[in-house]
Amino acid sequence: MKVTQKEVDAIVVGSGPGGATVAKELTQSGKRVLILEWGNNAPVKGTARQAVPQLFMPGKSLLLTNELLSIIRGITTGGSSLYYYATAFDPPVDMLQSYGVDIRKEIDVVRSELPIGKLSDDLIGPMAKRIMQSACDLNYQWHKLPKFIYQDKCRADCDKCTWGCPYGAKWNTRMFVEEAVRNGATLINEAKVDRVIQNNGKAIGVQYRKKGKMSHVYAPLVILSAGGMGTPKILRRCGIGRAGYDFFYDPVISVLGVVDDIQGGKEVPMVYGVHMEDEGYLLADMTFPWAFHALSAAQVFKFPKIFAHAKILQIMIKIREDLGGSLTEYGVVRKRLTQNDKKKFASGYHRAKAILENAGAKDIYKSWYSAGHPGGTAKIGDVVDRNLMTEIDNLYVCDNSVIPEALGLPPTFTLVCLAKRLAKHLVPRK
């Protein structure tokens, strides 16, 4: 497909929360938008067979650090939002304001547009309820977490969240892409952007590869939303060498134990939890589908636990880790957990273990490290300005790479707000 500069007002690279939102907003303002997405656009089936290639393809969706910590990201239309657990944590208003970025108006708009709310009791499974009761017994402020879920479409006794919801219950940014396309945007899938085309210090287009063929497209605006690991690689090819350093990736472990009086394993994850903000970590219930649980157990050689899936209580520990590390020219992630990071995990493990024991769990063990939400690789105040523009005119960034400080929390709500703010900057109201 050939797209010329005269046909397109903006090119958006990537279709996660940032890219999908800004594309939708621009099309609502009458702009002609081209969306380039590395992944495919296959209908969501909610199966491991479909999801695994989009989540665990080495070098593409699955990256390993030099500590063998796995960073998982969804490569498909809608990005990782197809496979996230739809948890809508409030954006860090004060932190962003300290960098000159005010998203308070956007927060109100997003709350009115998206299905943000706490899950009704009839949709909560027995494992989350058991963990909640145990945590409350131990005087933790364990409470329901807000979710991006259309609850009239959600189903109890369902394990599809991890593999992508085929019922349309879990809001994801593919929905925004589809809206942008209905508004006139063009979506090209399996298009991997290699570099930004420049002229006299301005971005004028991008070069991308699809099925081995190189193509060039042109527009007066380019918005990179290729994610915390993808965007900095493109920026470096633009000559912005600062991108890809001192970042975060939200490391996670789970603490698991076996109970004898529950037959579960199919429920919405991250329904309840507690954010230990002063200590720098989040605790929440977690339930994996069988195949994902089996992989996690095998990683730590707990092979008998594979077959105990329906009786496993699991608590996730997500920490706000120290910034650090570097992304090499070939995309290798060099970053190690610090002693401070390990202390946070140790504290979280101690608390999670006590909660599980109080819930009647035995044979308690912990998973290996994994990570999601890599970001901070093109920070506000460093690589981009308060309006998310780089030092190259008309080249913007709108994804988790612009977040200047580690959150240790799911960033989707924040990114949707930032994208709405960016769209208003690009198309100011008269």
Image (cartoon, rainbow, N blue to C red):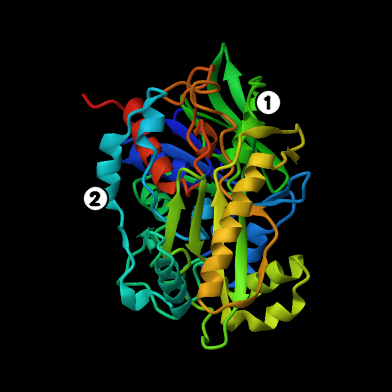
Q: Along the line of sight, which residue is nearer the eye, 410 or 344? A: 344
Can you give x and y, in whole percent of width and height, for residue 274 in the image? 43, 56
**Secondary structure category for the residue under label 2:** helix
Front-most of 279 and 106? 279
Q: Which mark is residue 13?
A: none
Work out whether mark 1 precedes mark 2 in sequence or the reverse, and give the earlier one: 2
Q: Is residue 45 visible?
A: no
Q: Residue at x 54, y 57 (%)?
A: 41
Q: Nearer the viewer, residue 260 or 92?
A: 260
Q: Which residue is mark 1?
A: 237
- Residue 51, visible in the rendered structure: yes
Please, is residue 286 above or below residue 202 in the view? below
Q: Quadrant of residue 351?
A: bottom right
Q: From what the image shows, is residue 373 above or below residue 353?
A: above
Q: How many other residues sit within 10 Å of disc 2, few (<14), some (14-19) or many (≥20)?
A: few
Name the residue at 55% across, 22% down: 383
Of the residues shown, which amino acid type is indicated by label 2?
Answer: Ser
Report x, y in % for residue 68.
Answer: 77, 51
Element carrying mark 1? helix
Residue furthest out toward the left: 430
| Crowd band around label 1 with a 10 angstrom C-alpha radius: few (<14), some (14–19), many (20+) | few
Where does the C terminus fall, quadrant-wise? Answer: top left
The image position of residue 374, as x and y in percent, is 59, 43
Residue 112, numbered circle: 2
The residue drawn where x is 68% and y is 83% is: 307
Q: Is residue 159 above or below residue 56?
A: below
